[in-house]
Image (cartoon, rainbow, N blue to C red):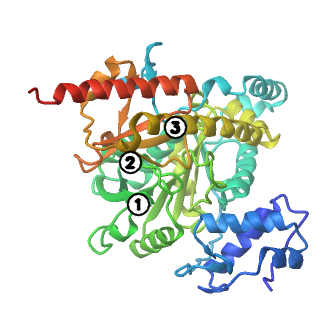
Amino acid sequence: MLYLTIDRDSPLPLIRQLYTQLRSKILQGELKAGQKLPSTRQAARELCISRNVVIEAFDQLLAEGYIESKQGSGFYVVPDMYLEQQARQEEAWLIPENDLPAAPSLIDFRSGVPALDFFPRTVWGRMVQRVCHEAPLSALGYNRPEGRLELRQILSRYLYRTRGVQCEPEQIVMTSGATQALTLIAKVLLTTNSQVVMEDPITQDIQTIFSSAGASLIPVPTDEAGMMTDLLPDPEQVRPSFVFVTPSHQFPLGGTLPIQRRIQLIQYARQANCYIVEDDYDSEFRYDSPPISSLQGLAAERVIYVGSFSKILSPGLRLGYLVLPPELVHRYQEAKWFTDLHTPSLDQLALGLFIEDGHLEKYLNRVKKLYKKRRKCLYDALTQAFSNKVSIWGASAGLHVVAAFAGVRFTPALLKELEDCGVRLYPVSDHTIQKDKHTEKLIIGYGNLSEEQIMEGVDRLQKGLAVSQARLQPTL
């Protein structure tokens, strides 16, 4: 018997209810390592729910590494799943050049840009019109630094339902995009003598934000599964203000941090008495499984969760947010106030209506199909053009892949030659903290390119590399 409770009146989907309860029992040790779960038929019969609900919940646990499947035997809890939970405290709430547009003839494989021509202009326009007609007068004046309560209430429900983020509306601070969110983190937590433990490679802009605040960056290598947490620095030697990670879709290499490493990272943060900054920049776009649950949902008291609508809707909206541990809320409200007072209120209200009326999830379901086709087109084009000379990383999620080309070093000179061939590309090495690593890898974005542009871009890349390599061959 599983001794689970299914609430059919809850707004939380049945799949999420079952997954959340099973995950909790595994993490708290109620379900032990090696323990066999009931069959999907038996569980469905006991809970009086569809077997498909049980199958999807088990598949989610399997995808995140909580359980394993043994052929012909069933599902079993994997080892090392126990994570001690700390009680949540109740507290009083207080208030470069490559950025330029590409020439029309240039195919630009920039990552992180959604399909701008698919932005739901008509629906968004209706939301804006409703806000202009129906918003209270308070929305037209100066507002609270943390943002409109209406949106924060909607967002807290949405994040719990879709990402497993556990927070109250009071823990959310709305920002003008993720860049401002990260800048506020630096402003509040970093000083000249601070240390930040970071994935390597990681976005160059983020490195600059933290180092500009005076912090020393301590790199931890990443592999196909994200940060290599067994290489975290000794907390007796290093006193980080926080550890920065992109656990759901590591940027740029694309790995997903498995549950064992997540637990190890949380335990490290507790031992070092520091925070974890979780940048969840595009994990809604996951193609081979449901979106991976947030790290924040495992240790809300330790994690600062950063989200943005730039990658999933439009960079032009400039809407992002922070989900904060309660003890940090007032400090971030104050920092936001002295940065730009508050994020535009009418845009916040329009976004709230867009989410509440179900338009965001409908839009995501629609464009995920589009991105999945574009991802396949890119994968097929690369493998056809380069065969076994290319390996592709991080194709399971997001709006880019990383392609590693055997025997190629993407120097600035080579990238310039390729751009002269009509294709703009971005090397992973631009984002490394320890230099001269990953020099054979390219970040290839596909979100804002048609299939025709993708195929033409790969063709130009293949021809450009062929010309370059031929020139380097010694003449007889």
Please report the residue visible at 25 percent of the width from the left and 38 percent of the height from the top: 409
The local crowd at label 1, few if under 14, some if 14 to 19, many if 20 or more residues have their Cα within 10 Å, is many
The local crowd at label 3, few if under 14, some if 14 to 19, many if 20 or more residues have their Cα within 10 Å, is few
Q: Position of residue 11 (x, y in %)?
A: 84, 58
Q: Earlier in the sequence, mark 1 or mark 3?
A: 1
Q: Is residue 154 above or below residue 409?
A: below
The local crowd at label 2, few if under 14, some if 14 to 19, many if 20 or more residues have their Cα within 10 Å, is many
Question: Which image quarter holds the C terminus?
Answer: top left
Q: Earlier in the sequence, mark 1 or mark 2?
A: 2
Secondary-structure class at tag 1: strand
One can see residue 117 in this view? yes
Secondary-structure class at tag 3: helix
Please state the total of marks drawn on the protein image.
3
- Quarter of the rendering containing residue 177: top right
Secondary-structure class at tag 2: loop
Mark 1, residue position? 227
Q: Position of residue 462 (x, y in %)?
A: 37, 28
Q: Which mark is residue 380?
A: 3
Q: Is residue 157 above or below residue 17?
A: above
Mark 2, residue position? 202
Q: Position of residue 223 (x, y in %)?
A: 38, 58
Q: Is residue 203 above or below residue 99?
A: below
Residue 29 or 267: which is nearer the viewer? 29
Residue 137 or 400: which is nearer the viewer? 400
Q: Please, which residue is most extreme toward the front here?
A: 476
Residue 40 or 140: which is nearer the viewer? 40
**What separation in Å lies between label 1 and label 3 (alpha carbons)?**
28 Å
- Quarter of the rendering containing residue 106: top left
Judge from the rendering whether residue 401 lies leftward or rightward of residue 359; answer left or right. left
Q: Earlier in the sequence, mark 3 or mark 2?
A: 2
- Identified by mark 1, the residue type is Met
